[in-house]
Amino acid sequence: MAPSDWRLSSANSTTPCMAPPLPEPSESKVTLSVSDNYISPLHESPCFSHSVPTESPPSPPRSTAAMDHSRDFLKDVKRLIIKVGTAVVTRNDGRLALGRLGALCEQIKELNSLGFEIILVTSGAVGLGRQRLRYRKLINSSFADLQKPQVEIDGKACAAVGQNSLMALYDTLFIQLDVTSAQLLVTDNDFRDKEFRKQLSETVKSLIALKVVPILNENDAVSTRKAPYEDSSGIFWDNDSLSALLALELRADLLILLSDVEGLYSGPPSDPNSKLIHTYIKEKHQNEITFGDKSRVGRGGMTAKVKAAVNAAYAGIPVVITSGYAPENILKVLQGQRIGTLFHQDAHLWAPVKEVDARQMAVAARESSRRLQVLSSEDRKNILLDVADALVANEKLISAENEADVAAAQLAGYEKPLVARLALKPGKIKSLANSIRVLANMEDPIGRVLKRTELADGLILEKTSSPLGVLLIVFESRPDALVQIASLAIRSGNGLLLKGGKEAKRSNAILHKVITEAIPETVGGKLIGLVTTREEIPDLLKLDDVIDLVIPRGSNKLVSQIKSSTKIPVLGHADGICHVYLDKSAKMDVAKRIIFDAKLDYPAACNAMETLLVHKDLMHTSDLNELIVDLCTEGVTLYGGPRASSKLNIPEAHSFHHEYSSLACTIDAHTDCIIAEDQEAVEVFLRQVDSAAVFHNASTRFCDGARFGLGAEVGISTSRIHARGPVGVEGLLTTRWILKGSGQVVDGDKEVVYTHKDLPIES
C-alpha cells in the first residue's frame, strides 16, 4: 500500500474511551464590628494492535459552562494530542514565549492529573535555533564581517540547536509542575517502516502508563528534506500533518491544533466583518474560504492546519483549531465550550447550527432604534402600553416557564438567594406591567431642550437629550430585569442586546418573545436582541463601533471581567453592600423597624442591608442586646468585626466587603443610611458619606428605580461617571447640540459679536 493511501485508511474508528469530566474552572447573614467611634460587623490502526486501558479515573464535577451540543462527544475523550504551532511557542522577535508555554504546561499538568492521556507535538525548534545561532554569529563577528553579504544559516543546524533548547525548556517547566516529559523525534521515512510504527505505539503506551508526557517533533536536523519549511512532500510535511498522522496512528480521541488566532475565519481575522467558523463543513466551506499568507515563522499556517484537520476528521478523529494565546483554551475545549473551529466527519449530518453574528445583531438593533426615534412621542408611548398589556395577557405562560426555571435551579442545587431572585412571585407580572404604564405616561425624554443659549444675534444653540444608541446589558438571575431594561430602552429610543443568566433561560426567552411581538413592524422586533450563550459575549464586547454602552448587572466578578474585556464604555457597579448606621441619638423603635425592613423585606435584593454599624456608646445597652436577639430570632446570622465579635460573642467576619444577599449581616463598617435624631450628626453623615444614595431614617430598600419614581431601572450604578445610583431613562440618554442660524460664518470672528445669553426653555 502506498504511504499516501495508508495515511487515509488507517483510521478504522473504535468506540472512544471514557474521559473524566473537567472541573468547573448561602444563607442569611450580618456582620458586627467596633471602631473608635462605632461597633461594626481531558481507531484502531492496522499496525496498532495493543489494547488501550479502559479504566477511567475518578470523575470530578463537569463544568456548568454553556455547551454546544454538537460537541457532546467531548465528554468521552481520553487520549488527546495537542499540537503547538511555532507562532505560539515564539514571540514576534523569535524568542520563546515563556508565558504561553507556562500556561500550556499548567493545562497539561491538570489534564494529566485528571487521567487524560496527553501527547504533545511541538514546533519551534528551527525558529528558536535560528534566533540563537544568529545571535552567536553576531557576537563573534568583526565589523568587517558584518559589512559582507550575509549567508542564511543552514536550516538543519538551526533545527539541531533549537531542538535541544526547546526540550530543555519544556523539561524545566514540567519539572516545576512535578510532571515528567519525554522527547520522541521522528522523520517522514520512519513511517514507511511498519516495525517503527509498532514500536512508536508501544513506547507511547508505556510512557502514558507511567504518567509521562511524550513530546514529539519532526527531526529536521536529519530529515531527508533538503530545506525544512519548504519541502511539502512525503507521508507528512509539517508538524500539523504529523500531528494528524499521529492522531490516527496512536488512536487519539481528539486533536487540538493551537494557533495564533481563535480558529478558522470566513475572511482575514483582522477584518471586523470576518466571522469565526465554529463548525467546519467541508461541503459548505471548502470553496468559500480564501487563505492568506502562511505562518510568519512556521511552514504552513492556517492552510496547513485546515488540510491536516480535514484529513484527520474525515478519517475519524475530531479536530479543534483554537488559539494557543488564551491561557485555558484546552480546558475550555474539553468542557464542550463553543470556542475555536470544530472539524468532525459527521458535521454535515448535524442540524444546522445558527451561527451567531454579533455585528449583525448589533447593527439591526441600531437600525431599529433609529426607526423608533422618528416616531411621535405618542406612538412610542403606545408601544410601551402594548408591551404592558401583552405581559398581562401572557401571565400564565410566563409563570409556567418561570416555574420550570425555578424547579431546574432547585434540582441543580443552586443557592437559595439565587433561586429567590429567579422566581417571579404572584403578582409580579402585573406589577411590572403597571411600572411600564407609569414609564409610558412620563414626559417624553427624547429631544427635550435642556438649555437654550443665544450665541450671537440670530444664532441660537440648544442642548437636547438624545438616545445613546445601542446598549448591551448582561444580567444575572432576575428575569424581571429583562422587562425593566427592555421598557427603558424603548422609552429612551435605544437599541438593546440582552444576555441573561442560563438559570433563567426559559423565563428570558418567553419574556423576550412577548415583548418583541408587541413592537410594531415599523420599528421591528430586532430592536431588542436576546443573546443566548456565554460564548457570544466576547464577540459583542469587541464591537465598540456599533455598541455604545455596556451595563453589567450582577456580581462584582462579572463587572470586573467585562470592564477588562472591552473598549466600550461600561456602566457598572461594585458589590451592592448597603450599610445602616445606628447613632446613639436614634429612637430604638424607629431603628428596629428600619433595620428589620432593610434586612428582612427581601434579603436577596442589592438594596438590602449587609452591614449594621453601631455607635460605641450603645455597646453595653439593653437596646442593642434586644435588637441583636430579635435579629437572631428572625433567622439572621450575625458576624462581627475585630472588636464587636469578641465583645458580642459572635463569629468574626472574614471581610467587610461582602454582599450576603441572604439572611446574614455584618456589624461594623461605613454606611449609607443613618438612623439618628441628632441633626448635626445627620448633616455630617449626609454630606460626607461617599455613597451613590444616602438616607436618613429610612430603609435602604427604598433605593430602587420604581420607588424613586423613575418608572423602572436598568440597574444601580456605583460609578461616578455618567450616571450614579438607580439608573432610569435619563441614565440611558446623552446630549446633542443643535445650532440654528441664518447664514453666519466665523471668518476669524471679525464680525460676530458673541452675547452668550441664556434663553428660556420653550415648552
Image (tube, rainbow, N blue to C red):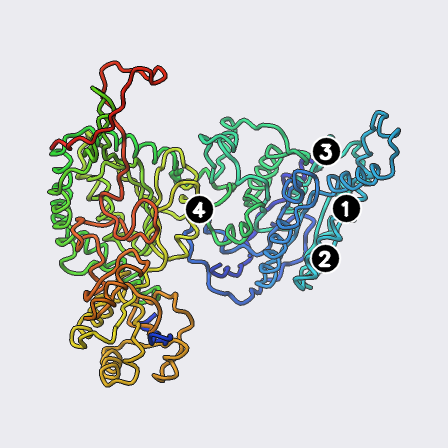
Dot 3 lies on which element?
loop
Residue 704, which numbered label? none
Q: Measure how far apart labels 4 and 2 are at the Cα level.
A: 38 Å
Dot 2 lies on which element?
helix
Residue occupying image coordinates x 33% and y 15% = 750
Compared across the picture, whether 385 is left or right of 233 comes to left
Say which residue label 4 marks.
Answer: 70
Say which residue label 1 marks.
Answer: 163
Dot 1 lies on which element?
helix
Residue occupying image coordinates x 20% and y 19% = 458
Comparing labels 1 and 4, the label whose residue is closer to the camera: 1
Comparing labels 3 and 2, the label whose residue is closer to the camera: 2
* Identity, as a three-letter code, of the amino acid under mark 2: Thr
Compared across the picture, whether 264 is left or right of 617 comes to right
Nearer to us in this view, 502 or 10: 502
Dot 4 lies on which element?
helix
> Please, is residue 716 above or below residue 263 in the view?
below
Residue occupying image coordinates x 86% and y 31% = 143
Q: Measure how far apart labels 3 and 4 are at the Cα level.
A: 35 Å
Q: Measure how far apart labels 1 and 4 are at the Cα level.
A: 38 Å
Residue 703: give x, y in percent of width and height. 23, 58
Residue 172, which numbered label? 2
Determine which quarter of the picture holds residue 96.
Answer: top right
Say which residue label 3 marks.
Answer: 229
